[in-house]
Image (cartoon, rainbow, N blue to C red):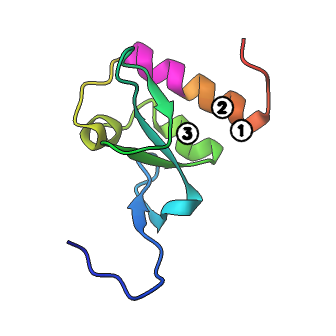
């Protein structure tokens, strides 16, 4: 168990850039139980975190950290779909 000073925010690593930041500054990703698609989510379970920055999101397409964090194989097509969805989120574009 990681001990934190009272009131200290949890720290997580971004799977895009590998830098550490407060959990609240990162977007939480996890595998959706039914479809296997990686989605932004609330709740409990294995998670990966990424900064909502274009460079971190783009790095997900080549990062092995996503699969390691989720303890699952994340295929190239799933990874590509995730990157596109997060890029739309960053630009505020409506889903296609």
Q: Is residue 25 left or right of residue 13?
A: right
Disc 1 and disc 3: Cα gap in Å?
9 Å
Placement of 68 over or under 21, stated as above or below = above
User: Which residue is depicted at the point 55% across and 36% down?
Assistant: 58
Q: Is 21 placed above or below 71 here?
A: below
Q: Dividing the picture into quarters, in which one does residue 5 lie?
A: bottom left
Disc 3 element:
helix
Assess disc 3: are there few (<14), some (14-19) or many (≥20) residues with their C-alpha within 10 Å of its C-alpha: many
How would you rate the neighbour count of disc 1 (Cα within 10 Å): few for under 14, some for 14-19, many for 20 or more? few
Q: Assign the magenta stretch its main secondary structure.
A: helix
Residue closest to the eye, 6 or 93? 6
Instruction: For the N terminus, give its image quadrant.
Output: bottom left
Residue that lies at the very extreme toward the bottom in this rendered image: 5
Q: Which residue is mark 3?
A: 57
Front-most of residues 19 and 40: 40
Q: Dot 1 corresponds to which residue?
A: 90
Which numbered disc flags the more N-terminal residue, 1 or 3? 3
**Quadrant hosting residue 25:** bottom right
Q: Which residues are magenta?
A: 76-82
Which is nearer the eye, 52 or 36? 36
Residues at marks 2 and 3 touching, judged by CB atoms closer than 8 Å: yes
Magenta-colored stretch includes residue 12: no
Dot 2 alpha-carbon crowd within 10 angstroms: few under 14, some 14 to 19, many 20 or more? some
**Element under label 1?**
helix
Q: Using the image, tell me which numbered label, if any, was put on residue 71.
A: none
Q: Are marks 2 and 1 in contact (CB under 8 Å)?
A: yes
Distance between mark 2 and mark 3 Cα atoms = 7 Å
Q: Nearer the viewer, mark 1 or mark 3?
A: 1
Element at label 2: helix
Quadrant where the image shows the C terminus: top right
């Amino acid at each position: 168990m990681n001990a934190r000073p009272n009131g200290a925010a949890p720290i997580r690593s971004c799977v895009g850039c590998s830098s550490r930041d407060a959990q609240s500054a990162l977007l939480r990703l996890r595998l959706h139980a039914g479809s296997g698609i990686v989605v932004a989510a609330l709740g409990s379970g294995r998670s990966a975190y990424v900064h909502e920055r274009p460079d971190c999101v783009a790095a997900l397409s080549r990062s092995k950290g996503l699969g390691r964090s989720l303890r699952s194989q994340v295929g190239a097509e799933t990874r590509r779909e995730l990157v596109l969805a997060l890029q739309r989120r960053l630009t505020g574009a409506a889903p296609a």
